[in-house]
Amino acid sequence: MTALETVHTFESGPMPTGVSVSHTGRVFVNFPKWGDDVPFTVGEIRDGEVHPFPDQDWNSPRDEGDAEALVSVQSIVVDPADRLWILDTGSPMFQPTKPGGPKLVCVDLTTDQVVRTITFSPEVALPTTYLNDVRFDLRRNAAYITDSSDQGPNGLIVVDLRTGESWRRLHDHPSTKALPPPEMLPIVEGVPFLERPKDGPPQPVKMGSDGIAIAADGSRVYYCPLISRRWHSVSAEALFDRGLSDADVTATVVDEGDKGGGSDGLETDDQGRFYLTDWEHNAVLRRLPDGTFETVAHDSRLLWPDTMSVADGYLYVTANQLHRQATYQNGDDKRTYPYHLFRVPIDAGPVRLR
């Protein structure tokens, strides 16, 4: 286990969720609109400051269905071709989505210009959908996305990057759904993690399929609900084959077992190892190819480790105190600055399937 290195401290402003690092070392972060004042939902860290990316215009939507601007971004991922893909939920404050809001936006990092926007039909991005995270396999021209909705069916969304077509898989499948108490009652900082409205009794958190990762050889896609200590995998080839029935795809699902704690983000490296945030224990775990687990980082400052990115021999991870939001604290916002972006050396590189 190695000590965390601080990459950036967020001394003011909204809480970050996603992080991704380009092949040349550029660091990008994003800020979903969950109630904070969010002047821009995607930014780049340069010279110790966060700047709107790709520019302020793209971060100034006219409404929640604006297909030509970023509405509320949950995740950003640099793909194997060193392009930044922005996953826009189109759902500020988890509101029902409108066509044009939920989308994938691709930025060419050589020019910092948006070169492609893929929107989702209402049959794919449902009104209840919350697009959470995405991974890419450019050998198949495929993107795989989790729908973590706490109000409707969960599942995975598959995108054919060649055509822009998309479809749902594992729709409402048990492996994509949050586990209710008493099957899962997560504990964070000694307190059960529950929705705690200012008026009314506590309620279980219902966020489903959240973290997603792709095996180093591209054979399988791994995913986990936010509220579950188990994780699953499914054949990537089956997900991408539109000729297969839902039953055919479901038949390839494998229960990968108990991963120890609640996980928000998943990630992989080019040595076939898997990384899992453990927000119950302020830690990041790693599963080795032989199936054993080890702790990569454990630190009291890892208050809700959220999203990870592998680049240049380091694992980057955000820590944003998500559980201290007013939603989970009887209406009292207990977050304190700063939020953090850390990294830890891992002696491995990112998975680049191309």
Image (tube, rainbow, N blue to C red):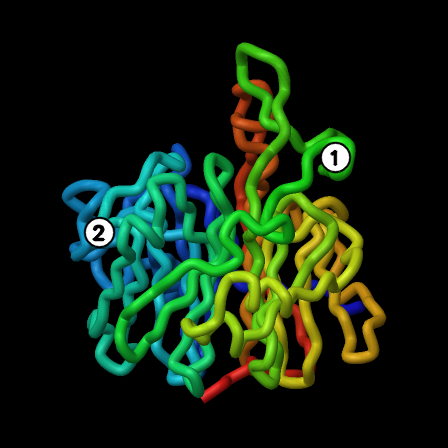
Q: Quadrant of residue 348?
A: bottom right
The x and y percentages for residue 222 are 62, 66
Using residue 351 as the reference point, say whether residue 91 is left or right of it.
left
The x and y percentages for residue 208 are 57, 46
Instruction: Find the residue positioned furthest to the top.
Output: 199
Q: Nearer the viewer, residue 37 or 121?
A: 121
Residue at horizontal 19%, vertical 54%?
Answer: 67
Q: Nearer the viewer, residue 44 or 95?
A: 95
Q: How many marks?
A: 2
The x and y percentages for residue 289 are 77, 79
Residue 36 visible: no
Q: How far apart are the alpha carbons under marks 1 and 2?
A: 36 Å
Which amino acid, by three-letter code, is at mark 1? Leu
The x and y percentages for residue 41 are 33, 51
Residue 69 visible: yes
Which amino acid, by three-letter code, is at mark 2? Gly
Mark 2 residue crowding within 10 angstroms, few (<14) / some (14–19) / many (20+): many
Residue at horizontal 77%, vertical 38%?
Answer: 183
Using residue 141 as the reference point, say whether residue 299 is left or right of it.
right
- Provide the residue designation for mark 1: 185
Residue at horizontal 54%, vertical 18%?
Answer: 197
- Provide the residue designation for mark 2: 100
Q: Is residue 127 above or below residue 244?
A: above
Quadrant location of the N terminus in the rendered image: bottom right
Using residue 81 as the reference point, say whether residue 117 is left or right of it.
left
Q: Earlier in the sequence, mark 1 or mark 2?
A: 2
Quadrant location of the C terminus in the rendered image: bottom left
Q: Nearer the viewer, residue 216 or 50?
A: 216
Dot 1 and dot 2 residues touching (CB under 8 Å): no
Q: Nearer the viewer, residue 335 or 58?
A: 58
